[in-house]
Image: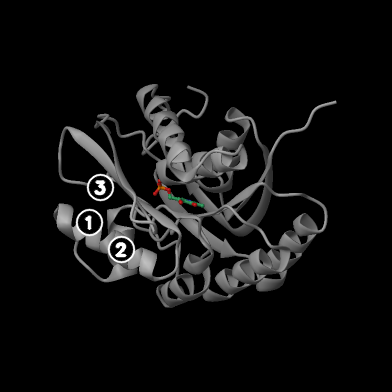
Amino acid sequence: MSTIPQVLTIAGSDSGGGAGIQADIKTFQELGVYATTAITAVTAQNTRGVDAIYPMTREAVRSQLQAIGCDFQLNALKTGMLFSAEIIEETARNIIEFGWTKVVVDPVMIAKGGAALLQQEAIEALKQHLLPLATVVTPNIPEAEVLCGLVINDEASRRKAAEHILALGAESVVIKGGHGTDPNKAEDFYLHRSGEFLFFGSARIDTSQTHGTGCTFAAAVAAELAKGATAKEAIYVAKQFIQSALKDELHIGAGHGPTNHAA
Ligand code: PLP
């Protein structure tokens, strides 16, 4: 008999299999944790883009979370595409009700093709209800800018943005460097409420097969937290995981293909 850490992803389904729930399950499997899921929206999409979004009702999200909370002993969870203020509120309510800790919040807003995965009016709900419950928030640069209302264009503004996100109640934040302007380097910046900070630098990988990188990174952080890693250890492993997934290109579909979770 054996057991493994149990992790929940609360996110959207990507029919193309590269991002969202599907990326999360693949990542959890690769990193040796058990995946449970609560689907917030079904998207019709492929590597070319998002054709349609069918959000779940608040009740549908609630009953998935209740089913999980009544049976599983979660070691960590991550949130991805939450779409609406009511789904965010329901998510936050259940995290509190079940006392779930080790919460990774990936503040998913816009798909690479431009589709809105979070309604504009839900941004306030994300800040108010979910960020205070977050162990780690994992915004990319544009998402961090929206969360803090600042433009990030240098080291000082990135640090200010991170401080602002912590002031919203999160325990730690990692602002990912994938959208940075340095053509050679992608550097993530981590800040904990204790004041501890770290840079996770790496060479930029030249590929267009990047669909689902954000989901995969956050899922890897959650998996490692579930196994007992600290936030910085988890981010370190997640960075390695995403680097391998980007390096070993799959070339599936005609557009922005998925990263290779099994690399
Ligand atoms: N679709 C879903 C359901 C997602 O959760 C995400 C990312 O979080 C995306 C699409 C966007 O993926 P990308 O911007 O990497 O193409």
Mark nearer the N terminus (2 vs 1)? 1
Residue 1 on image: x %, y %: 85, 26
| Left/right of residue 35 with respect to residue 204 in the rendered view | right
Cα gap from disc 3 to disc 2, whole angstroms: 19 Å
The answer, for residue 253, to whether it is visible in the render is no
Q: Few, some or many C-alpha atoms within 10 Å of disc 1 (few <14, some 14-19, many ≥20)? A: some
Q: What residue would you read off at disc 3?
A: 179
In 3D space, how far apart are the residues under numbered discs 3 and 1 (Cα atoms)? 12 Å
Left or right of 51 in this view: 101: right
Q: Report the residue marked by disc 1.
A: 158
Which one is in front in this view, the residue at disc 3 or the one at disc 2? 2
Front tag of 2 and 1: 2
Q: Which three-letter amino acid code belongs to the residue tagged 3?
A: His
User: Which residue appears farthest toward the front when viewing the image?
Assistant: 194
In the rendered structure, which amino acid carries the disc numbered 1? Arg
Which residue is at 63% across, 30% downward?
32
| Quarter of the rendering containing residue 163 | bottom left
